[in-house]
Image: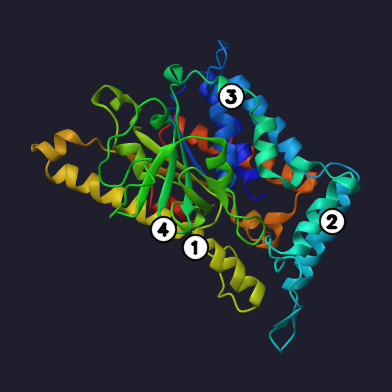
């Protein structure tokens, strides 16, 4: 649910795309970010003879998250109870360092109790798609099979983690129109073993569901190429894939700038060492979410440096400079969030973060337009 901030950011970005202030050549997301970027990409794509647009993407993004939150009635009650249990589990006995027994996060999705609860939810008037990610994606992307891939102009990368073989996995819309050769493991071929522990697959709704599969809440997502968990454990989100693996004729898809919408803050929001168990869990999750991203961004910084050093040689001529920028929450808002609040699907909470995203993005985009926006890595920090 913290990705509701990203919804607000993307809304403002789409406003400027509609005004032709820049070209949106690609999107990348993992977990809830995968859901956000999928919906924007889907709204921009031509389907069944109907062209997409920034306005369509903006409308569908809003509608998607309005459906994703708990509706009044049984879902709102379920959300209230579940979230309160998770918050109670974060409460620590002063001085003893002991938390309440785990309940909400300890149900095994393969276990009989979990499956019984899930089976009963529809009888309590809880929508199937509220807890069924596959069903939800099919509902919000009803014309996915009608996408005219040869007319898609915006690239989408979705990050997931293949569980059994430990493969970093990217579901890439570019693969849908450009079948890959068997090289270096970057092929959708389950019989071919990858020495590089990576795979690059065609974009599917199953792949997006895989990207959002936290193992404590959902069974591993199966596709034709393996079983998958959340992309948090590999690429969060995929970045380096924007810069290679394309035909020479498609080099225009390589971005001039990367804008990172950072949900997990780089710095500790409360500017203090986490000492309580809940704060430790929250910070652990934030650090895990940033680890793979920072490694990829640091490599891009090195390529920029090498390009400058070897600008008169083939390396410099074959690589473009890429400016990386960060869009992030304000420190005061980030300080109010906990690990448990990621699972608070109340409408008020979603709208609060969405409005924050709009406000931050509008100010940031105005700075960018006037060439006053900062650059990574400095702009990943709060002032």
**Which residue: 57% across, 30% down?**
40
Sequence order check, earlier mark of 3 and 2: 3
Looking at the image, do the residues carrying marks 1 and 2 touch, with CB atoms under 8 Å apart?
no
Percent across and percent down for residue 71 are 84, 41
Q: Please tell me which residue lies in front, 85 or 128.
A: 128
Between the residue at mark 1 and the residue at mark 2, the CA separation in whole angstroms equals 27 Å
- Quarter of the image for residue 355 reads top right
Circle 3 SS class: helix
Q: Which residue is mark 1?
A: 288
To which quarter of the image does residue 22 belong? Answer: top left
Label 1 or label 3, whichever comes before in sequence order: 3
Find residue 220 and report its horizontal and vertical position in percent: 58, 54
Taking the spot 27% from the left edge, 27% from the top edge, the residue there is: 247
Residue 8 rendering spot, x and y as whole percentages: 63, 37
- Label 3, on which residue? 43
SS category of the residue bearing label 4: loop
């Amino acid at each position: 649910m913290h990705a509701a901030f990203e919804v607000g950011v993307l809304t403002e970005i789409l406003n400027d795309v509609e005004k032709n202030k820049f070209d949106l050549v690609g999107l990348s997301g993992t977990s809830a970010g995968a859901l956000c970027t999928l919906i924007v990409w889907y709204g921009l794509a031509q389907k069944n003879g109907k062209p997409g647009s920034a306005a369509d993407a903006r409308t569908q993004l809003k509608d998607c998250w309005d459906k994703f939150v708990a509706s009044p009635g049984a879902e709102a009650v379920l959300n209230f109870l579940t979230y309160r249990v998770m918050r109670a589990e974060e409460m620590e006995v002063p001085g003893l360092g002991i938390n309440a027994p785990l309940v909400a996060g300890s149900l095994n999705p393969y276990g009989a109790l979990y499956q019984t609860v899930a089976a009963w939810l529809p009888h309590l008037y809880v929508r199937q798609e509220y807890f069924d990610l596959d069903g939800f994606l099919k509902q919000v992307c009803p014309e996915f099979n009608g996408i005219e891939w040869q007319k898609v102009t915006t690239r989408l990368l979705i990050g997931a983690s293949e569980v059994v073989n430990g493969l970093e996995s990217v579901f890439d819309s570019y693969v849908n129109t450009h079948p890959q050769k068997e090289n270096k493991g970057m092929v959708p071929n389950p019989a071919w073993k990858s020495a590089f522990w990576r795979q690059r697959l065609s974009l599917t709704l199953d792949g997006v569901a895989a990207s959002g599969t936290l193992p404590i809440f959902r069974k591993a997502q199966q596709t034709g190429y393996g079983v998958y968990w959340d992309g948090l454990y590999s690429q969060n989100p995929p970045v380096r894939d924007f810069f290679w693996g394309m035909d020479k004729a498609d080099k225009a898809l390589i971005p001039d700038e990367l804008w990172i919408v950072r949900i997990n803050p780089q710095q500790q929001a409360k500017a203090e060492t986490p000492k309580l168990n809940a704060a430790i869990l929250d910070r652990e999750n934030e650090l895990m979410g940033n680890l793979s991203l920072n490694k990829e961004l640091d490599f891009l910084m090195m390529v920029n440096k090498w390009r400058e050093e070897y600008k008169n040689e083939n390396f410099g001529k074959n690589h473009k400079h890429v400016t990386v920028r960060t869009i992030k929450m304000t420190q005061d808002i980030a300080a109010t969030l906990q690990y448990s609040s990621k699972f608070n699907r109340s409408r008020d909470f979603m709208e609060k973060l969405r409005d924050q995203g709009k406000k931050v993005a509008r100010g940031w985009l105005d700075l960018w337009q006037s060439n006053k926006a900062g650059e990574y890595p400095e702009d990943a920090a709060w002032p």
